[in-house]
Amino acid sequence: MSLPKTRTATVDALSGSGRVRRGAGPAQTASPRDGAAPWGAALLTAAAMPLLLGLAAATEPEPVTLGLAGLTLTWLALRMERLRSAARIATRHRDNLARLAAPAVARLVAESDSVALRAGWEQEATVLFADIRGFTCLCETLAPGEVAAFLAAFRTRAAQAIELAGGLVDKFVGDEVMAVFGVPHAAPGDTDRAVAAARSLAAAMSAWSGERERAGLPPVRIGIGLHRGSVFIGAIGAERVEFTAVGDTVNVARRLEQMTRTLACDCIVSEAVVQDAAPGEARIVAVRPVRGACAVLRLFAIRLDP
């Protein structure tokens, strides 16, 4: 008779499913775009269950068939709960990443292949650096907790101005912010968006200074530098990686921001920025080599008020 074989096949199928279930745990924490794959696998695996139940119904008494049906429903319930748990874990990881990085970076890291991110790529971009003037002297009059609150207020306003203009906050270092425009994908008007972000950031600092002065606190002034050129984009590091832009263009943009202190202007941009941006008011303020750059650059000041 074929009855013993039927029992054996049924039990083997169920135990084999148990082995797959135990080994597939880490794979279920894949990126959100792969979320359909585990559900599809569950349905394909479950598709064999009606066939087993039909075979059992033809060869077994009714209690055995009902028992198999109960086991099948229990297995499917456990499988669905495991998939829901994996989805919750993936969502939590993505949310945690979003708290530590800009939303655009969090999405890019979550949706991109890690090998491609580590390999990186080279492209044209416009880089913005901004820094608070006299921050060291300001800190001397504040308690550590007040310094943290001050920086949090600055970073909130800076990130909002940059992201609303279409830029990507690359990093904050103390009272300094670095942003890139045209990352991860370059588009026409990236430099115009960088200039708009500089003006929006200056307006935000002016409004904040007004609030502080009404509260009897010193105003906040910033210096901004803009440069355009080739940058390398990618996840850089060994065990601790950072998605960032690096290269000579980044170094020059930072030097231009630092030169606002000696050239007595709030925003200095390179000739590459002036040439790529829409026509606007810009005056030349220096023709000199920039520390860290090989070429002699023509430097321009632009007005930050609308």
Image (spheres, rainbow, N blue to C red):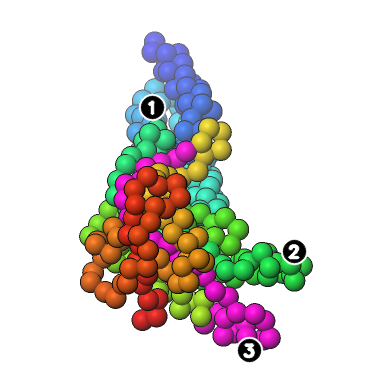
Q: Say which element carries label 1.
A: helix
Between discs 3 and 1, the one toward the N terminus: 1
Q: Give the Cα separation between the discs numbered 2 and 1.
A: 68 Å
- Disc 2 + disc 1, Cβ < 8 Å: no
Label at residue 52: 1
Residue shown at 50% from the left, 66% from the top? 262
Along the line of sight, which residue is nearer the eye, 255 or 167?
A: 255
Residue 275 seen in this snapshot: yes
In the image, residue 213 sits, relative to residue 259, either above or below, namely: below
Residue 288 higher or lower than 279, as above or below: above
In the image shown, does 51 or 292 lie closer to the viewer?
292
Tell me the amino acid under the disc marked 1. Answer: Leu
| Magenta residue span | 207-236
Q: Which mark is residue 144?
A: 2
**In the rendering, at what x and y percent does residue 284 appear?**
33, 68
Q: Can residue 35 be seen in this view?
A: no
Q: In which quarter of the image is residue 235?
A: top left
For label 1, the crowd category at 10 Å Cα-Cα, with few meaning under 14, some 14 to 19 and many 20 or more, is many
Residue topped by disc 3: 214
- Residue at x-position 39% and y-position 52%: 289
Residue 247's spot in the image, x, y percent? 40, 44
| Front position in the image: 283 or 276 | 283
At 39% from the left edge and 80% from the top edge, which residue is drawn? Answer: 305
Percent position (x, y) of residue 123? 30, 46
Local secondary structure at mark 2: helix
Residue 168 lies in the magenta-colored region: no
Q: How far apart are marks 3 and 1 (CA)?
A: 78 Å
Q: Which amino acid does label 3 sit on?
A: Arg
Of pointers 2 and 1, the one earlier in the residue sequence? 1
Please state which of the two labelled residues, at mark 2 or mark 1, is closer to the viewer.
2
User: Alpha-carbon neighbours of circle 2 within 10 Å: few (<14), some, or many (≥20)?
Assistant: few
Let me know if residue 214 is in the magenta part. yes
